[in-house]
Image: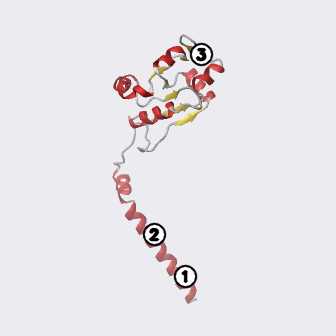
Amino acid sequence: MTVFLKLVTQMIVIVVVAAGIGLVLNRRMLVEAWTGTVNQSPTGELPNAHRLPLPLGIMQVKELFDRGEGYVIDARDAATFAGGHIRGARSLPLAEVEKQLPEFLKQFPKTMPLVIYCNGYGCHDSMELGKKLIRAGYWEIFIFEGGYPQWREEGYPVEGTKP
């Protein structure tokens, strides 16, 4: 019986010590939660500087497009955009984002979903632009990895001089 009692005592000590360490290490978070001062985004999510844009497939992008939910953003340069782009897309070239961002912030609410695309799976401009927009305060950033080539191949609405 003493071995059992000793084992139970050790288990209780381990649990109490672990709980104490947890409380000490998470003190700030617990105080914020207790007092209701947790800093939250407009959509109720906790802020996270390390968030990444989420990928969307062609069907998801087409569904958002058809319902008119959010905005489609083209990360390619202005000349490529003029040659052909998803109908209704807004041009925000990655190379010009710092210059165009103040005007972009005025036109597009941070709470609306943004679907960003570029020249398909080998193009990373959309991901980089998405990261910059997250840092600028946007919360719903999606990347259409198939980009303009996949959209055009599916026969979905395009516009420009060489759609």
User: What kind of residue is marked 2?
Assistant: Ala
Within 10 Å of disc 2 (Cα), the crowding (few <14, some 14-19, many 20+) is few
Q: Is residue 148 visible?
A: yes
Which numbered mark, 3 or 2, is in the foreground of this view?
3
What quarter of the picture does the N terminus occupy?
Answer: bottom right
Tell me which amino acid carries mark 1: Leu
Cβ atoms under marks 3 and 1 closer than 8 Å: no
Residue labelled with disc 2 = 18
In the rendering, which numbered label is found on residue 157?
3
* Residue positioned 53% across, 80% down in the render: 8
**What amino acid type should be assigned to the residue bearing mark 3?**
Pro
Crowding at mark 3 (Cα within 10 Å: few <14, some 14-19, many 20+): some
Closer to the camera in the image, 53 or 39: 53
Q: Position of residue 61 (x, y in %)?
A: 58, 27
Q: Quadrant of residue 48?
A: top left
Q: Earlier in the sequence, mark 3 or mark 2?
A: 2
User: Decide: marks 1, 2 in contact (CB < 8 A)?
Assistant: no
Can you name the residue that lies furthest to the right here? 154
**Residue beneath the point at 42% across and 33% down:** 133
Q: Is residue 156 above or below residue 140?
A: above
Residue at the spot of label 1: 7
For the residues labelled 3 and 1, the Cα–Cα distance comes to 70 Å
Q: Secondary structure at mark 3?
A: loop
Foreground label between 3 and 1: 3
Mark-to-mark CA distance, 3 and 2: 59 Å
**Residue 86, visible in the rendered structure:** no
Q: Secondary structure at mark 2?
A: helix
